Image: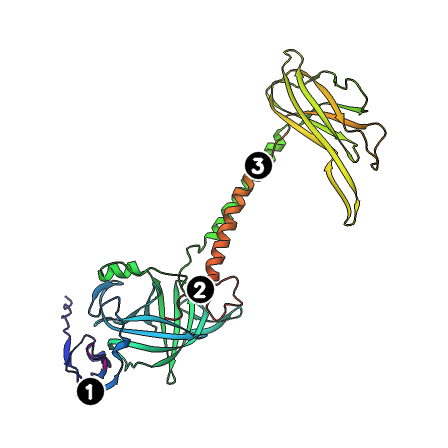
Amino acid sequence: MAATPQPVRARSLSCPNCGGLIELRGFEHSRSAVCVQCCTIIDPSTPELTILQKFDQKLRVRPLIPLGTRGNWQGAPYEAIGFQVRCINVDGVEYCWHEYLLFNPYKGFRYLTQYDGHWNDVQTVRGLPTFTRVGDHKAVEFAGLTYKHFQNAEAATKFVMGEFPWAVRVGERNIVDDYVAPPYSISAEMADGEINWSRGEYVTGTQIWQAFKLNNAPPAAHGVYSNQPSPYAGKPGRAWRTALLLLCVWAAMLFFFVIGASNREVFSANHHFSPTPGEQSFVTPVFELGSGAKNVEVELKTDLDNNWAYFNLALINESTGQGYDFGREVSYYHGVDSDGSWSEGSRSDSATIPRVPGGRYYLRIEPEMETPTSGFSQAPRGFNYTVAVRRDVPTTWLFWIVLPFLIVPPIITSIRAAAFEGQRWMESDYSSTESDDSSTGDDDDE
């Protein structure tokens, strides 16, 4: 039977500067500790507790996770033992983030970093990434993932509290290279000829608050962080696949709807109209529509030239006298001006009457038109036209109304996904060239 790990107890020291109590929770791992009373950094590994540095208490920052707070994080108990504020300067603007050092005597150290409400769970990595390239980006490969280079900057430590496994100092500077593969990141920190690699995973403030049972609510996240997972990840592809499937169904339904309609011509006749005084209406010979209640299309084709005509029409059932009255205006004009040739209107038009019962019908037609004016060329005293009647004509307007609803959603999803990525890369070293995989670094580095 395995032995139960014995609880480890923290040891206490007195600050050599002010005599305040310093409790060490990292044991022999601690290489520096900070007196919370006087902000003195000491080396607890030396018997005389060597003072490494003193810094201005006015720079004091209150951590969101109080030191000494314990919680169950990633399946193991951890205690917050260290806190530091680090900053970079980009084009004269300072960006700062917080780092919390967590310690478990059996599992070692890990870090929680926070910038503008965005959190990462960070651990040092064993092994070295392999350098590569992705397009115009530097990149590294590690543990089966490819990380694209995001930013290179010099990070400076502005404030420390608690204890650390290295001799931390305010003003300490490291060159930091960040690479991202959301929701993961990998960073290289270079100082004094040494390079340390760490891997971060994006987590939410809610997860941390629940794990450490913190009061109040975590700070709200603002903007888009460098390795923040996109809420649209994979959605454009799925949306376009769904749209393609629906478009295939739409096209098949349209095809069978068009093919299934008989579109049979039941009457056609040619006529000539002259604008003379008197009654101009007439009726056509009777034609048979066939059985069932189906639509009827009446089409007009003219040879109008720089003029218009109006047709009063009625489809009348020979047996019942029931009529369907409607009208159509046909106009066609053209010419030449300073911009070149122009034309407007059309020489033809049609009207569709839905659900006309079968039977014998005839058309009453009454054309009228404007008398020709000077300057326009037109066939003498009127125009020629053709009237055609078709039964069971495919009406596809509803299909074309539905079409945008199939195409617009994936377009919107793709635009939103691109906008999110655009924000991701806005403050990276590639903000001017990144177009397909952008992200806003509201944060700068881990």
Residue that protrudes farthest toward the front in the picture? 374
Q: Is residue 37 magenta?
A: yes
Q: Position of residue 180 (x, y in %)?
A: 42, 67
Rounded to the nearest angstrom, the CA distance separating label 1 from label 3 is 82 Å
Which residue is rendered at x = 63% and y = 11% of the image? 320
Instruction: Name the main secondary structure of what is drawn in magenta.
Output: loop
The residues tagged by marks 3 and 2 sit, at their Cα atoms, a distance apart of: 41 Å
> In the rendered view, does 132 fall on the left or right side of 207?
right
Q: Which element is circle 3 on?
A: helix
Whether the residues at callouts 3 and 2 have beta carbons within 8 Å, the answer is no
Task: Say which residue label 2 marks.
Answer: 440
Q: Position of residue 71 (x, y in %)?
A: 22, 64
Residue 33 lies in the magenta-colored region:
no
For mark 1, does the 10 Å Cα neighbourhood hold few (<14), some (14 to 19), or many (20 or more) residues? few
Q: Is residue 154 above or below residue 272?
A: below
Nearer to us: label 3 or label 2: 2
Furthest toward the top, the residue is 319
Mark 3 surroundings within 10 Å by alpha-carbon count, few (fewer than 14), some (14 through 19), many (20 or more): few
According to the image, label 3 marks what residue?
399
User: Where's the N terminus, which quadrant?
Assistant: bottom left
Q: Give the label on residue 322, or none.
A: none
Secondary element at image label 2:
loop
Q: Quadrant of residue 276?
A: top right
Q: Can residue 65 be seen from the camera position used here?
A: yes
* Pick the front one: 72 or 65: 65
Q: Which mark is residue 46?
A: 1
Q: Which residues are magenta?
A: 36-40
User: Which amino acid lies under the numbered mark 1 shown in the image of this protein?
Assistant: Thr
